[in-house]
Image: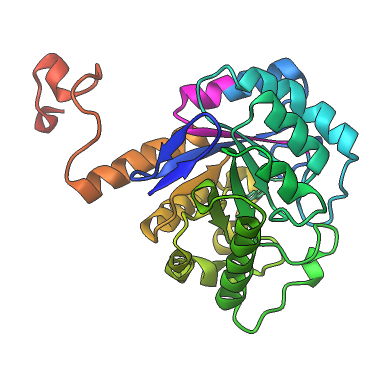
């Protein structure tokens, strides 16, 4: 399976890592941590060096209870970072629901719009359709970030999320966006309890029936805190485990804060699946470099 995006066609025969770059003062894990543009660009470079396949740059925090910035404020946050990231040789995604931001970043050359509101704001779908190769991630969310903690009620969360994503996929096709450009995301933590999130993981395979790749973001989220009892700053191992569990159930792209750890874990997972590694033997610490076998170590 492939994902068609502006400058690239991403081969999804191996799982891909999308690195999160939050240009926000209030994100739940890393808000305000990379305050200057230079620091944010350095973070993009570090994520690419750590093996990120895609950068996802966002200027709006969607943590429960967050208030949306104005479109102008959001644009001012992301534009300089996107401009620099476009020179790093990897696909650039912009996490936004705002048509003004979409239009500006797509005109600049951004590859993907990642929209937690699945192109439901007036004008959003037309912006993406107007760029005939741009990719899009359509995510499930019930309500809005400032109200979603009261929207977490479902008869069958997996069926409801699948129906919503299927309807959005049909709507964007109708609006002129080819399905090859679209990936679908169940929206972990968006108006969902820990039980809902875990049902979406256990039954993630049901979402594959729509024929489009699944992108999913478990990184540092509250359900991992519920399971492990750890605060957000201590959820690295839990986040990596969740990313592997999602990939093992068919996710094509994982959206993560901790790129290096996730990339390593996926390399080992994939080597275990294939009975071989994608790259072996050229690293200074490999057995071949000094003639020692693994057993001698
Ligand atoms: N989660 C967040 C933001 N954007 N996009 C997609 N497609 N899927 C997700 O699960 C997802 C997302 C929330 O995480 P983060 O960006 O780290 O935090 P904040 O929204 O507080 O900036």
Q: Front-most of 182 and 35?
A: 182
232, above or below 108, in the image? below
**Residue 168 position (above or below residue 82):** below
Figure coloring: rainbow
Residue 57, picture quadrant:
top right
Look at the image and give the residue range highlighted in magenta: 45-59
Q: Position of residue 223 (x, y in %)?
A: 61, 61
Q: Horizontal placement of 283 versus 115: left or right?
A: left
User: In the figure, is residue 64 to the left or right of 246?
Assistant: right
- Front in this rendered view, residue 273 or 112: 112
Q: Splitting the image into 4 quarters, where does residue 147 fall? A: bottom right
Percent position of residue 253, x then y = 47, 47
Which percent across, then down, holds residue 50? 46, 26
Towards the viewer: 51 or 222: 51
Check the image and report above or below for 77 versus 117. above
Q: Residue furthest bottom?
A: 155
* Residue 150 falls in image quadrant: bottom right
- Residue 243 horizontal/vertical position (percent): 46, 51
Query: Can see residue 220?
Result: no
For image coordinates 38% across by 36% down, the residue present is 264
- Which residue is painted at 70% across and 37% down in the image? 30
Of 190 and 125, the residue lying toward us:
125
Image label count:
0
């Amino acid at each position: 399976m492939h994902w068609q995006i502006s400058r690239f066609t991403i081969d999804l025969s191996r799982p891909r890592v999308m690195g999160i770059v939050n240009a926000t003062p209030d994100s739940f894990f890393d808000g305000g941590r990379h305050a200057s543009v230079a620091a944010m660009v350095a973070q993009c470079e570090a994520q690419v060096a750590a093996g990120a396949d895609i950068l996802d740059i966002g200027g709006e925090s969607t943590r429960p209870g967050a208030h949306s910035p104005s479109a102008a404020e959001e644009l001012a946050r992301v534009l300089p970072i996107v401009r620099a990231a476009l020179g790093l040789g990897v696909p650039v995604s912009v996490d936004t629901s705002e048509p003004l931001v979409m239009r500006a970043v797509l005109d600049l050359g951004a590859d993907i719009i990642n929209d937690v509101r699945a192109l439901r704001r007036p004008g959003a779908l037309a912006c993406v359709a107007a760029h005939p190769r741009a990719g899009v991630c359509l995510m499930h969310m019930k309500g809005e970030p400032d109200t979603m903690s009261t929207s977490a009620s479902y008869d069958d969360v997996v069926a409801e999320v699948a129906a919503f994503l299927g309807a959005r996929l049909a709507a964007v096709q109708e609006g002129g966006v080819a399905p090859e450009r679209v990936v679908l995301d169940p929206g972990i933590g968006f108006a969902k309890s820990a039980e809902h999130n875990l049902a979406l993981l256990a039954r993630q395979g049901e979402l594959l029936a729509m024929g489009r790749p699944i992108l999913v973001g478990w990184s540092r989220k509250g359900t991992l805190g519920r399971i492990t009892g750890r605060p957000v700053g201590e959820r690295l191992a839990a986040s990596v485990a969740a990313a592997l569990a999602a990939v093992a159930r068919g996710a094509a792209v994982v959206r993560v804060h901790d790129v290096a750890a996730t990339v390593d874990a996926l390399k080992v997972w994939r080597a275990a699946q294939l009975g071989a590694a994608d790259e072996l033997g050229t690293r200074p610490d490999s057995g071949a470099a000094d003639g020692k076998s693994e057993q001698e170590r």
